[in-house]
Image (spheres, grey):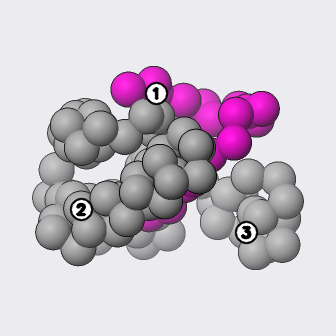
Amino acid sequence: MQLLYPPEPSPIASAVAIGVFDGVHLGHVALLQAMQRQATAEGLRSVAASFDPHPVHVLRGPHSLALIEPVSRRLARFDALGIDASCLFAFSPAFARTTPQAYVEEV
């Protein structure tokens, strides 16, 4: 699996699942597998996009939420699921202020 950190624009068409994915529970797995099926059906690269640090840690402080798994374990779970690439976005107060329109167009 390719790790894109920091993510850069890519000319490769991709199907992307976006989320924190802390714990990669059964619901996350179902979402990621659905994204993979769609990517395969359309000949796209499958990409799991996540955030580091956890957005809650940035917005409310590092002691506001205990993480289920470290980022390294999350990436290992993506890899075990056969995801082609993972993006980790550096979550910051500035990133949190990104408008939905800018997120879609720029990120």
Residue at 41 percent across and 53 percent down: it is 36
Residue 33 percent across, percent down from the top left: 31, 59
Tell me the crowding category of disc 1: few under 14, some 14 to 19, or many 20 or more residues within 10 angstroms, Cα based: some
Type of residue at label 1? Leu
Which residue corresponds to mark 1? 3
Point out the tag, 2 or 3, that comes first from the N-terminus. Answer: 2
Q: Nearer the viewer, residue 81 or 90?
A: 81
* Residue 49 seen in the current view: no
Which residue corresponds to mark 3? 97
Q: Quadrant of residue 6?
A: top right
Type of residue at label 3? Arg
Residue at 58 percent across and 44 percent down: it is 44
First to last magenta residue range:
1-21
Q: Quadrant of residue 99?
A: bottom right
Residue 60 percent across, percent down from the top left: 42, 72
- 11 within the magenta span: yes
Label disc, if present, on residue 58 of the rendered structure? none
